[in-house]
Amino acid sequence: QVQLVESGGGLVQPGGSLRLSCAASGRTFSSAAMAWFRQTPEKEREFVATIYRRGGGSFYADSVKGRFSISRDNAKNTVYLQMNSLKPEDTAVYYCAAGNGGLISRAKPEYYDYWGQGTQVTVSS
């Protein structure tokens, strides 16, 4: 069992930065792939970034590539999402996810077994 708690969301101006954190409980953290997704009322849950078990194998949605960076600290059971050059279209609730979905793409929500409660990110002037 893994429990995930996100933090670090808030209101930021366009062009600004935020760093999201996701603290995980449970001893399976280091063996799980981790990811960030986001969702708005108008859209389905959207993949943002993922990182594999020991910090390798990260990849990003095209919409955030070059602006966002995912990392993890297995000693602290925490995964991070550094978000730079934020745009109004990045406004969403951001969710942390953990799992080992086998052959399913890590960009799909179905890969992940555990989800956090979400943290709101609003990009507005």
Image: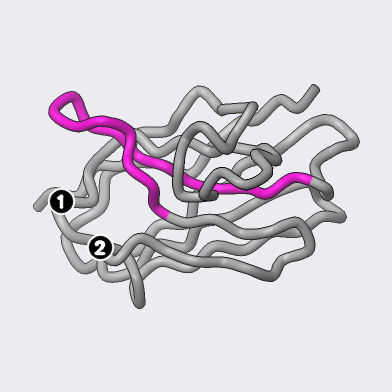
Please name the residue that numbered disc 1 is placed on: 89
Q: Which residue is mark 2?
A: 63
Direction from residue 47 to residue 97 in the image, left or right? right
Q: How is the image coloured?
A: one colour
Q: Is residue 120 left or right of residue 53?
A: left
Disc nearest the viewer among 2 and 1? 2
Q: Earlier in the sequence, mark 2 or mark 1?
A: 2
Residue drawn at x 34%, y 71% as measured from the top left = 65
What whole-number distance in Å separates the C-alpha atoms at marks 2 and 1? 10 Å
The foreground one among 86 and 125 is 86
Residue in view at x 48 percent, y 44 percent: 8
The residue at the point 34 percent across, 41 percent down is 10
Q: Is residue 52 above or below residue 46?
A: below
Please state the extent of the stretch shown in magenta in the rendering: 32-48
Name the spot of residue 11 as percent of width and height, x first: 27, 44
Q: Residue furthest left?
A: 125
- Which amino acid does the dot numbered 1 rest on? Glu
Task: Please tell me which residue is depicted at 32% across the width and 42% down the height of the picture.
Answer: 46
| Quarter of the picture holding the N terminus | top right
Check disc 2: other Cα within 10 Å, few if <14, some if 14-19, many if 20+.
few
**Magenta-colored stretch includes residue 73:** no
Give the secondary structure at mark 1: helix
Task: Please tell me whether residue 6 is drawn above or below residue 74 in the rendered image.
Answer: above
Q: Do tag 2 and tag 1 residues touch (Cβ < 8 Å)?
A: yes
Question: Dot 1, how many residues are within 10 Å of its Cα: few (below 14), some (14-19), or many (20+)?
Answer: few
> What amino acid type is highlighted by mark number 2?
Ser
Q: Position of residue 76 (x, y in %)?
A: 81, 50
